[in-house]
């Protein structure tokens, strides 16, 4: 019986290590990391435009948008995740590089790599996000994807003048969790 808590702690440690390794921005210098994030942004937007062409005009008319790459690990009753991304302000032309982290509790198992696109419909929503960056909510999700095979279930949501699109890149996950997500400025890249 004493082995179960030890096994759970070991699994969470491995999950945290894997999540950290998968969510590190590629590149050694600040410029290489910024270039990698910009490439991830372009690739993600192109994938989203293929699946939902109307999002292109939505972004063109918005105050700004953000694109993030995230990896999550869910083991029984806990989940960890982390990532990075960029927010583009359409009015000022300013680019803000950001990090993100997630912690969740609930029922789940699996690993998931996904992209998140946020469309800010008002300048206040964009400014608030860059300054405060908190998001909190429940999530029910099923994803099974490897390369071009498989599929993902994810929905568009509109919260506080922000449209949210999630696309699963790879992974296998089944979860029903309550999670907190924190976005914050990456001072090393800004």
Image (cartoon, rainbow, N blue to C red):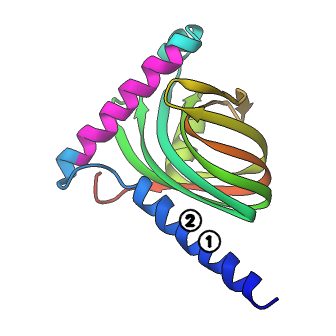
Image x and y of residue 9, in percent:
65, 79
User: Could you tell me which residue is drawn at 48 percent across and 20 percent down?
Assistant: 47
Q: Is residue 140 above or below residue 61?
A: below
Residue 106 visible in the shown view: yes
Question: Quick check: 95 left or right of 99?
Answer: left
Q: Which mark, residue 12?
A: 1
Based on the displayed image, in which of its 4 quarters is residue 11 positioned? bottom right
Image x and y of residue 42, in percent:
36, 25
The dominant secondary structure in magenta is helix
User: Could you tell me which residue is drawn at 33 percent across and 51 percent down?
Assistant: 25
Tell me, yes or no, whether the two marked residues, 1 and 2, touch with CB atoms within 8 Å. Answer: yes
Q: Residues within 10 Å of mark 1 (few under 14, many from 20)?
A: some
Q: Secondary structure at mark 2?
A: helix
Seen from the viewer's position, the closer of residues 45 and 172 is 172
Image x and y of residue 88, in percent:
41, 33
Based on the displayed image, in which of its 4 quarters is residue 75 positioned? bottom right
User: Could you tell me which residue is drawn at 57 percent across and 13 percent down?
Assistant: 51
Asked whether residue 182 is drawn in magenta, I would say no
* Residue for badge 2: 15
Separation of marks 1 and 2 at Cα, in angstroms: 5 Å
Q: Secondary structure at mark 1?
A: helix
Image x and y of residue 53, in percent:
55, 8
Question: Quick check: 49 left or right of 11?
Answer: left
User: Could you tell me which residue is drawn at 72 percent across and 65 percent down?
Assistant: 78
Q: Is residue 55 above or below residue 156?
A: above
Asked whether residue 42 is drawn in magenta, I would say yes
Question: Quick check: 157 left or right of 65?
Answer: right
Span highlighted in magenta in the image: 33-49
């Amino acid at each position: 019986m004493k082995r179960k808590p030890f096994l759970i702690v070991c699994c969470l440690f491995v999950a945290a290590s894997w999540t950290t390794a998968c969510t590190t921005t590629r590149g050694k210098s600040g410029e290489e990391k910024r270039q990698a994030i910009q490439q991830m942004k372009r690739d993600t937007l192109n994938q989203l435009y293929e699946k939902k062409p109307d999002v292109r005009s939505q972004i063109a008319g918005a105050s700004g948008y953000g694109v993030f790459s995230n990896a999550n690990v869910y083991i029984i009753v806990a989940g960890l995740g982390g990532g990075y991304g960029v927010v583009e302000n359409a009015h000022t032309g300013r680019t803000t590089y950001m990090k993100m982290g997630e912690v969740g509790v609930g029922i789940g198992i699996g690993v998931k790599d996904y992209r998140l696109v946020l469309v800010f419909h008002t300048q206040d929503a964009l400014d608030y996000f860059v300054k405060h960056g908190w998001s909190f909510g429940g999530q029910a999700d099923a994803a099974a994807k490897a390369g071009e095979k498989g599929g993902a279930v994810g929905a568009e949501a509109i919260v506080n003048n922000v449209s949210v699109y999630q696309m699963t890149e790879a992974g296998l996950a089944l979860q029903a969790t309550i999670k907190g997500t924190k976005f914050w400025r990456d001072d090393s890249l800004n």
